[in-house]
Image (tube, coloured by chain):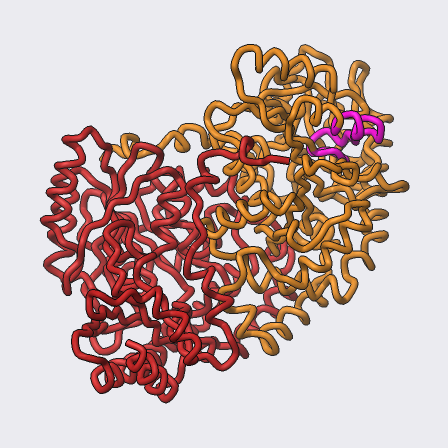
Chain colours: A orange, B red
Amino acid sequence: MEYVKFFSNVADWAKPNPIRRLTALINRPGIISFAGGVPSPETFPYEQIAEISSRLVREKGAEVLQYGLTRGNPKLIEYLVNQMQKRGVQTKTEEIMLTSGSQQGLDLLARLLAEPGDVVLAELPSYIGGTFALNNSGGTLTGISMSEDGIDLDAIRSKVIKMRDLGCQVKLIYTIPNFQNPSGITLSLEKRKALLALASELDLLILEDDPYGELYFNTPPPPPIKSFDTEGRVIYLGSFSKVLTPGLRTAWIVAPSEIISKVELIKEATDLCSSMLDQAIVAECVRQDLIEGRISKLREFYQIRCQSMLSALEKFAPKGTSWTRPTGGLFIWVELASQIDTTELLSSAVEQGVAFIPGAPFYVNDAKTNSLRLAFSKETPERIAIGIEKLCKIF
Amino acid sequence: MEYVKFFSNVADWAKPNPIRRLTALINRPGIISFAGGVPSPETFPYEQIAEISSRLVREKGAEVLQYGLTRGNPKLIEYLVNQMQKRGVQTKTEEIMLTSGSQQGLDLLARLLAEPGDVVLAELPSYIGGTFALNNSGGTLTGISMSEDGIDLDAIRSKVIKMRDLGCQVKLIYTIPNFQNPSGITLSLEKRKALLALASELDLLILEDDPYGELYFNTPPPPPIKSFDTEGRVIYLGSFSKVLTPGLRTAWIVAPSEIISKVELIKEATDLCSSMLDQAIVAECVRQDLIEGRISKLREFYQIRCQSMLSALEKFAPKGTSWTRPTGGLFIWVELASQIDTTELLSSAVEQGVAFIPGAPFYVNDAKTNSLRLAFSKETPERIAIGIEKLCKIF
């Protein structure tokens, strides 16, 4: 039977995520992997989560094993009001909802805000899951270049004006301001304020995706763009995936209540509610201070790995190679001499026992094929040094 | 700030689910509730799930707390190949994927198969979550009446022909063949075969949603429509929500691999993966035979409640009232004298301490406002008898 005639446009829009497609190749036993941008399982509080999960099922099973609120666990939402305040954002429970990971938040927001005919601005490079979600709702992604202090504001202005002159509907800027995936770049304080002012001038919404902000090394990044938002122009996404565990699919959106109500309606028809046990476990981890109480160790853990990678790059990288020096997060971005195609390098790297992600898929347009992403989260500092030495020989 | 200008069409399509909106009203303490169509928490195997969850986190935490496969837990998928075989469906792992509840399956399939301009046929009445998901993707729902043995096949034929004459694209029939939510009706064996033949004749796909099939009382329902499907025309949805627990959001789709691959791509940008812990717990429950080993008790549990409700209706229902006599599932459907509007009755019923769901929202068109849904899953047989007596006085 031919199925294509039954398919909607979404079937054409939905593309395989190249990173997830590389998984089989990358997960070879023994390989030194700088590929997957996942938190280190060494950082998970196993014993506490084991104890919490069984106790919740025994004591609150009728709640945590039953259907629940689409909006999410109310205790966790209350905690997030406080947590957001610590991050400089004044909010209230009506402006917060939980999602099954930030990926679900991005997808729900994409469905609410982007449809065929809409243009969404994204950083060059950007997080693939974010741009894919926006694309699957029918939005057209267009890229804005970045420099060391973040997205290029002049490029936003000229692009928006040009596209609107052409009759395009430009609604939204998608940005990851802290230790960006994939580049490791952080948007400076001045640019945060200027970006918000520009969004106001051009009447754009900002999608501020912040899964990494708490994973800073020495000094916190500037406050979220959302903290300067007096108009209700910024939609903020936070996540427990990198500071607790990603398998318990729990993240949150902070947005004006009109937007939250709509997102809640869409989520209702999407999955009724997120995993009740996951949310309850995360809420209890919060109560036991397993996130904030462990965060300084987590920061140190990743800083050591980042440092090991930066030192090895310094030592072994051939001339003509440049890389970012992130002050937090999980990623370093590398650019090789311009004639090198990193996609072609990957198979020989894997043969030598090292994996990375080629940079091209992170670009919604104008891909730099000489770039690549290195995640320093998975390997020990020793293996990082060995892996980078091997990799630099291949470069 | 005005947000409407930023919203896509989905914002208009997404409507509040009237059942979930009634929750606050219905969940008053002490109320006898025939409203929520949720499994009884008395049936959840708390102790075993408590033990399983902590053991999984301790022994397999690096897997169950980490990101995982979009397609879902491979062990659970393997089990489902066998489980489907017991239900009469020959399938293989490439034709199965897991979702966060069947609601997510319905939403993903809606996104793949329904877009503006497409007509989807649904039963009158039908499951609200299903029709809402199809509607949120832009599909136009149109209803087909049912009789005691299920959906009206002649009405399908004449409607499809008429709509196609008008230039409409009709792709899909959405059906819940076993102990349907909300009506309790089961599609007969003859009609299953005839429906499939008709779908083939008219070149339609069938979405067969089967969360209740295992909850039969005395004799199993006829085999799934999917079991007769030689062409690959049926997409089957199964769920652990009613036979284990719904809070562990785990369900599955069985479909031709071309469809599964596309649904997997869409899910990838939707949430990367479902809760890893939920899936692992369900897989371990399966290994410990906590589903099939407990199912006969579960059937008996709900049969006693259904019987209590049927007896009380027999005893107390006023003349002019009719109701279905389900042979499984969680629901009885009632029709009162035609001049009565059950939506208007609800508040006095709640005042008297009894809740139900008015029938109108279950109809995608031509609502019978004199109908209502009674769930017999939540209350004890004694409270069911008391509640029905009270309710019948109000009727």
Q: Is residue B290 magenta?
A: no
Residue drawn 25% across and 70% down? B334
Instruction: Spot the residue most to the bottom.
Output: B382
Horizontal placement of B12 versus A315: left or right? left
Q: Which of B17 and A127 is in front in this view?
A: B17
**Number of marks in the image?**
0
Quadrant location of the C terminus of chain B?
Answer: bottom left
Q: Give the range drawn in magenta.
A: A176-196
Horizontal placement of A214 versus A264: left or right? right
Residue drawn 30% across and 70% down? B331
Horizontal placement of B107 versus B58: left or right? left
Does B234 sit above or below residue A142? below
- Rendering coords of residue A161 (x, y %): 63, 13
- Rendering coords of residue A346 (x, y %): 62, 26
Q: Nearer the viewer, residue A223 or A4?
A: A223
- Rendering coords of residue B182 (x, y %): 30, 63
Q: In terms of image quadrants, where is residue B12?
A: top left
- Rendering coords of residue A130 (x, y %): 59, 35
Q: Does the magenta stretch include residue A188?
A: yes
